Image: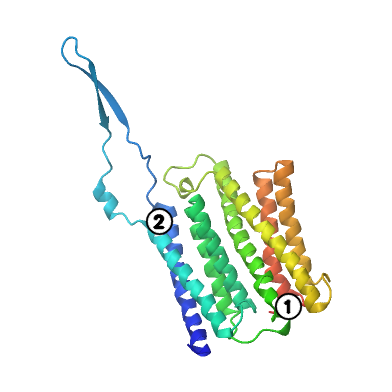
Amino acid sequence: MHTADLANLSDKLMLSTVVLYIVALVAYAADLGFGRKRQPAAAVRTEAKVLVGADGPDVTEVVASPEPAAEDDRRRIDWARLAVLLNALGWASHLGIILSRGLAAHRWPWGNMYEFLTAIAFAAVTAYLVVLVRYKARFLGAFVMGAAVIALGVANIWLYDSVGPVTPALNSYWIAIHVTAAIIATGSFTVAGAATILYLLKSRREAGGPIAEDSVWARVPAIDALDRLALRVTTFAFPIWTAAIVMGAIWADEAWGRYWGWDPKETWSFVTWIAYAAFLHARATAGWKGRKAAVLSLVAFACLIFNFFGVNYMFSGLHSYA
């Protein structure tokens, strides 16, 4: 395919991806709102003893409780499966956006803000799918899909840039290492942020009294589970963010002749690192849990978001590619 055809394919796949993510978002929300609850696998058993003859042994009869009406189950929409299926199809289409864009540009497809934000949204969805498989965290689906839709919408409406060459400073093999690490870490931090927000919302709801069995919050895991999930994802992402900063310093030495110059992007990347390091240190040494740790995690996530949007549009520096 020609460059123009690949670029056009990338743009069309973007539309397909957004549509699939929106429908998946609706399906995840429906699953949270009125999806089928999980029932215990074992049936309730009762025992009845029957005498056989005068001296006969006791015979135990096991009676299982009746099964739920199968007809009702058939008529009920399985929102969970539908959401995961649409999510997977959207992920594949999203991957197609990145691959076709890279082939059209003959370079790594994160040389401008449009491509970078598209890649971060892909990393966030990928991180969510990994968490979904490993920890059965389907409850995060609506939040991650919402973040992905917003990110892709911002990328298309305000940040779109046609396929073309990158600035000389970005024409390096380090873009495949440094920027990729930053993208993976940012996507993972986004999933941890979604779990943290859910933790704060549910803990506040629990403080107001018992949660009804048929409410949305009854389908969200316990706050301890949300807390552990956010910590695990953050623990995974933090070393990758650290590596991104170190590799960025090495690249800066090759490109500009110095490892560190307190450029706004460098400064806020370090501030973000400090905030997440403080969160992990507080959890490991001070035993911070609950609301205090969650607020500190959200402060770190806010630093991350500002590092992406605020620095690129509010400050000028060597990293200002917006």
Whether 192 is drawn above or below 121: the answer is above
Name which residue lies at 44% across and 47% down: 215
Residue 283 place in picture, x, y as percent: 70, 45
Side of 228 relative to 1 (left or right):
right
Residue 83 place in picture, x, y as percent: 42, 61
Decide: marks 1, 2 in contact (CB < 8 A)?
no
Of labels 1 and 2, earlier in sequence is: 2
Q: How many marks?
A: 2
Residue type, numbered disc 2? Ala
Name which residue lies at 73% across and 54% down: 277
Residue type, numbered disc 1? Ser
Side of 21 relative to 54 (left or right):
right
Side of 311 relative to 206 (left or right):
right
Tag 2 secondary structure:
helix
Q: Determine if residue 8 is in view.
A: yes
Q: Which residue is label 1 attached to?
A: 320
Q: Which mark is residue 80?
A: 2
